Image (cartoon, helix red, strand yellow):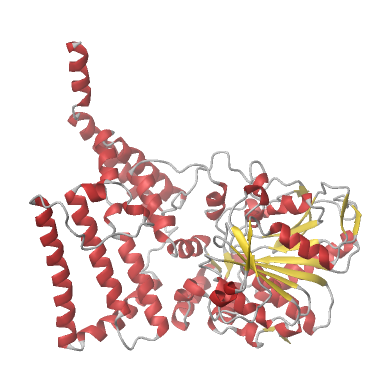
Amino acid sequence: MSDVDTTDKTEAKFDAEAFAMNIARAMESSGQALAAYLKPRETGEVKDKPPSELTEVIKTFSSVAEYWMLDKDRASDLQHKMGKAYLDLWGSAMRRMAGEAEVKAAAAPSPRDKRFQDPEWKSNQFFDFVMQLYLLTTQWAHDLVRNAEGLDPHTRKKAEFYVQQITNALSPSNFVLTNPEVLRETLASKGDNLVRGMKMLAEDIESGRGTLRIRQSDPANLEVGVNIATTPGKVVYQNDLMQLIQYSPSTETVLRTPLLIVPPWINKFYILDLRPEKSYIKWCVDQGITVFVISWVNPDKELGRKTWADYMKEGPLAAMDVIEKVTGEMKVHTAGYCVGGTMLASTLAYLAANRRQRVASATFFAAQVDFTHAGDLLVFVDEDQISALERDMAESGVLEGSRMAMAFNMLRSNDLIWSYVVNNYLKGQPPSAFDLLHWNSDATRMPAANHSYYLRNCYLDNRLSTGSMVLENTLLDLSKVKVPVYNLATREDHIAPAESVLYGSQFFGGPVKFVLSGSGHIAGVVNPPSGGKYQYWTNDDIKAASVAEWMKGAVEHKGSWWPDWLQWLEAIDAERVPARDVGDVLPPLEDAPGSYVRVRA
């Protein structure tokens, strides 16, 4: 019995030698990470230069600082308030150390803040003090921006965004010695977590060719065309910008009018064809719809001059011509997701202006046609920032997918950046296989000319809804678009806010059904009925001044909006015909999902 006790005690003792060895191994791996960072710079593959965003940060914070520093009394009052808050925190910490039971916290995290969920953030006096110090400082930094008078709305929004990024980065949860969970893991594993983490860090920098590409998902068992994007079909057409996929029928009869889906080119189309149980495309096929999907190219420098008009002509317009050849139908149902929806709307306006009747209906998934309420992405849009981006794109001809991916990740940096930094590189825990995050990290490049046109004509000048956008010498007017529209917004969307989508509904000239889905930009759209998740709301009043007002008269429905959309689609044209076999008219070029989607940035 005593021998067992002695063994247990021996095993429980801290092994300093093993810890030192692991720290040495972690330092070796961190050296490999540094080498992976430096190598492409030494060979000239990567040229370091100050990021253009740095100028914006300095300029924005200078505007905030100017307000506080121009008035001595104002600056003094600010320092006094900050000093008092820190002294109050210090006093409460001393009282707690003295054994006082009930000490009111100077600052407390939001119940939804996942960074401070570990019990030791509250039970341990040191970590509690560090957390409150951080929260007070964060609150003070935000108050600096919030209370600075005279800032124009755009500058204030940028300042709030930059403060959020800096404070998120400096959170004590992001460092080994100030994160109780990481510190426990480090001691318990004798530093082995840091060995694993630094090894992953080196691998991620190497895979990013000198730039950190944070892995958000384990790529094992997630291969396009093998485990995801597996709905049977064929590529029936391709040009420089896209492959057109026709999916094989799974029913004996299908709706007479086929469906053309226009996905965003900012990401790849298979967000709508993830695993079979989550695939919108497969679900549509199983409901008896002949589905065609555009798979956009991942462009290189040679395609850098392709414009918005080129994407329209070689994308949806070319697809409609092919679909007419394949099915004999002159009209198609259409659906556009995110920027693909913006492209679809401009295509509809172009067709209407030229009196060409090619479309039976239009469905928009989290897509904007008016950018007045465009949300967080407006932080990146002004003349100076667009001009700087255009100078960068002029060298390479494209916008690298990693830059756009980082911009989107920064909108939710705690969830999409720092949580992975902590789990991957500090805890040494590789992420699990998750199809959605695998897709999210599968970034694409964008042609310089097309991206510049999009930023200037949509985000900066808002030309589509105001009737001043010109494509192919044609002035676009959304009020001439008379086809029925199903306009889906998602309630927690930070990319295409529901407020923006609702307001955009008012610019179409035909009947519009506005539907609000639960969750966000992705989960609110990719929500199969079999999952039984979330809900959606309907209300015929698209003239409501706000989503809050619209919700007052809305009816809530449990589950997915997909069946509601199908019912709407069949009300337009319910006629069915024998299923169309793929390859009857045009010989297939290759199996779905095609080769364009496999090209990684």
Height in image: 454 above or below 324? below
| Left or right: residue 104 compared with residue 257 | left
Q: Quadrant of residue 203?
A: top left
Height in image: 404 above or below 507? above
Quadrant where the N terminus is found in the figure: top left
**In terms of depth relative to the viewer, which is nearer, 27 or 46?**
27
Q: Quadrant of residue 323?
A: bottom right
Quadrant where the C terminus is found in the figure: bottom right
Height in image: 395 above or below 283? below
The residue drawn where x is 55% and y is 60% is 519
- Measuring from the top left, give residue 70's x and y in whole percent: 21, 88
**In terms of depth relative to the viewer, which is nearer, 19 or 375?**
375
The residue drawn where x is 47% and y is 81% is 382
The residue drawn where x is 53% and y is 45% is 434
Q: In the displayed image of the protein, which residue is found farthest to the left?
A: 98
The residue drawn where x is 23% and y is 83% is 68
